[in-house]
Image (cartoon, helix red, strand yellow):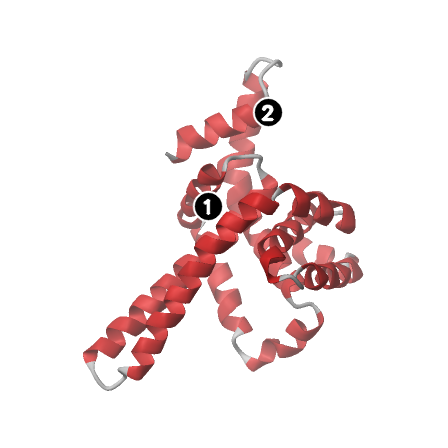
Amino acid sequence: MDYIRIFWTHFWQLAFLNIVFCLACLPVVTIPAALAGMNRACIKLVQEGYVLVWLEFRDAFRKEFGKSLGLGVLFGGLLAGSYYLLSLGLSNGGNPYGLLFSGGGLCLLAVAVLWGQYSFVLLPSLDLPLGAILRNGWSLAFLGAPSSLGILVLFLVLLSPISLGIALFFGVAFVQYTVCFLVNFPLQKWILEPFRRSQQESKPKKSTNALVFRYTRAFFL
């Protein structure tokens, strides 16, 4: 299986990527850009089977710093809203409102995790405006239902004590490698492969970025 083969072949690169990510996150404001850089390295590894970790991380960190802040504010707000609803659910556990708040908090958490993960993988993968990234991320979360289910299961597993040993060594790198592996399936099917076909049918003078933007807007709007 490619997932296991790539994982073991690039075991130490993922460990190094995790260290780079942690160092880049020391100023809290850089966390979204660091996540974009990590996802760029991971999606490159998944798609091509190799990666120059530092170069990919550094380039994506610099390029996507501004747009990643916007995503960070949005999905950080969604996660905060989810936490607030879940806390209300716990404090009202003895009445029907507790169930209502808890259900709303879990739904909002699922939306934040799925929409956020797809968007943060698309951000360093496609040269698109932030609005297009968000629309495509939202659409792929539904179109790639099996991958979305896998991402939710992954995050449920991470909440268990079993995952503690893995998290201590690999941390975010292991999680994001797995997420990128799952996201790559709908990304290839719904965006990259149709884009390649449209590129072959288009005139050579057409810009690659313009074609991706035109196609994704036409498909997902």
Q: Where is residue 179 in the image (x, y as percent from the top left)?
A: 57, 56
Q: Residue at x 40, y 49 (%)?
A: 142
Which of the two residues, 6 or 77, is positioned nearer the viewer here?
A: 77
Mark 1 vs mark 2: which is more N-terminal? Answer: 1
Q: Is residue 118 rendered to the left or right of residue 60? A: left
Task: Return the residue found at the far left.
Answer: 96
Q: Which residue is drawn at 64% across and 61% down?
A: 27
Question: Residue 7 is drawn in which quadrant?
Answer: bottom right
Residue 169 seen anywhere in this rendered image of the structure:
yes
Secondary element at tag 2:
helix
The disc label shown at residue 208, or none: 2
Q: Is 219 drawn above or below residue 151 in the view shown?
A: above
Q: Is residue 153 rendered to the left or right of residue 27? A: left
Q: Position of residue 42 (x, y in %)?
A: 67, 51
Which of the two residues, 148 or 208, is positioned nearer the viewer here?
A: 208
Question: Residue 135 is drawn in which quadrant?
Answer: top left
**Marker count (numbered):** 2
Q: Position of residue 119 (x, y in %)?
A: 50, 48
The disc label shown at residue 23, or none: none
Q: Which residue is drawn at 47% across and 63% down?
A: 152
Q: Residue at x 60, y 62 (%)?
A: 28
Secondary element at tag 1:
helix
Q: What residue type is labelled 2?
A: Thr
Categorize mark 1 by other alpha carbons within 10 Å: few (<14), some (14-19), many (20+). Answer: many
Residue under numbered circle 1:
137
Q: Is residue 80 rendered to the left or right of residue 17? A: left
Q: What residue type is labelled 1?
A: Gly
